[in-house]
Amino acid sequence: MSWRWPLKEIFVGILVFSSFCSAIRLEIGFIGISVTHLFMPIIFGFAIALHKKSAKIFPIQTDNASIFLYFIWFVSIVSTLLYSGFPVRSITGAVNFSSFIFLYLMSSWIFTSIEANRLVKILINSASASAYIGVFSLVIAIVTNQGNIGATYDHISQFNIASITKPIPSIRSFSIEPNLFGIITASVLSIYLAIYLTWDKTNRIVGVITLLGLTLIFSYTRSAFLGFSIGVITMAFISKKARVVVRTFQYGAVFGILLALLIIILPDENSFKLAISYKLGIGMFDLSSGTAIPRLVAIQEGFDGFIKSPLIGNGIFSANNVFINPHTSEITGTAGPIGWLNGLFIQALHDSGLLGLLGWVCFFFFLLHLNYRMFRKLPPSLERSIVLGFIGGNIVILVGSQASSVVWISFPFVFWAINLSILKYYSKQLNSVAK
């Protein structure tokens, strides 16, 4: 039996969309088995069937970025086995991380059978489907005044603002929580925005940008806002087109003015106004009761662990992240999963030491460098705009991961597999043209 293209794309679409569904998971003790994990045996079987007529063995990606990803995994495993004070927790984390590396390898293998632009379309369609689910969930939550799997009131109630009497729920779609939804949505939005700014300005493009943009706003995720802003500005300057730079800042200025006017016009007790103001303003600097406290404590915990084992760290999720408010001496619980330290780099410093931190820095450097190098090689085209968008998307993940646990879900590994697969595809296309 030969696999037809539509079946391949449907199967790959299910795989990619599953990476947007981190909330659909089976919790067994310390282990959280996501829908992507549950789907992996079928994925692996499909990959074997897809490649059964070829003599290729399971491929190992050998680009610089992938090598540093393997290096991070190796250091983390060694550190976990040798130094962790919480072996059950750390080994569980190591198994989870290993499953993501396997997913990355397997996805890269499967994605080679899909034409690059079709693969990007699958990614964008998956993000759009996730956004539609989020909007529908938001409407249901507002009508019923109750949260649901796709929208939550918890993200607002934690703001410690007594005047919020009727909060607007924040969108999380099928993600674990709104922060993760905001980051992964912004990373895909970067691709479509790059296409709009540099190549295609059709109504369809505008519609998708509007959908993803609105859901991003209602995720109330400042790390996604910041990462997206940095990513867009970076894309504009990399394009080296004055009109793109000017248009980017014009759109940014218009959006900023409209948002400012909306906040001024809305009454002070309006929940949307309070949420946006808190998320973009005082919440970032509220050191007595705001969200800055667990982050400050996490930094201290991270450096304490680093001093204890500076080279190779203390093992995955070995941090004691039961946070105590330094002003009130009250235990505030944990921010995120047990052992997580509110940021990828500080987490790496604690769990895998200088070697792990160096691995993550080099991974993102080479990932962005590979995209930038391909961007410079390609002529003005849709492909060139897509690569530019992946630069912005990876910046979103890089920035967002410093305040959220985004690298501990399956999405970024699928995103990176797609990214590197299309770079290989475009490279082959350029080589064939050169010949």
Image: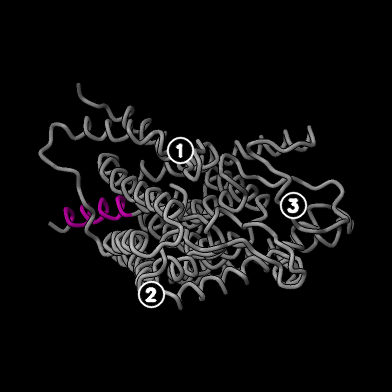
Relative to the observer, which residue lies in front, 165 or 394?
165
Residue 29 is covered by the magenta coloring: no
Farthest residue toward the left?
A: 55
Considering only order in the chain, which callout, 1 or 2, is on the residue closer to the N terminus?
1
Where is residue 40? Give x, y as percent.
Answer: 35, 36
Three-letter code for the amino acid on which mark 2 is drawn: Leu
Q: Secondary structure at mark 3?
A: helix
The residue beneath circle 1 is 18
Three-letter code for the amino acid on which mark 1 is drawn: Ser
- Left or right: 220, with 355 as reference point: right
Camera sees residue 374: no
The residue beneath circle 3 is 156
**Mark seen at residue 354:** 2
State yes or no: discs 3 and 1 in contact (Cβ < 8 Å): no
The residue carrying pointer 1 sits among few (fewer than 14), some (14 to 19) or many (20 or more) residues within 10 Å by Cα, namely many
Magenta residues (range): 420-433
Residue at image point 65% right, 49% down: 214
Q: CA gap, disc 2 to disc 3?
A: 36 Å
Q: CA gap, disc 3 to disc 1?
A: 27 Å
Quadrant of res 11: top left
Please determine whether, in this image, residue 269 is positioned above or below residue 21. Answer: below
Query: Which secondary structure type mostly characterizes the magenta part of the structure?
Result: helix
- Left or right: 300, with 115 as reference point: right
Residue 428 is covered by the magenta coloring: yes
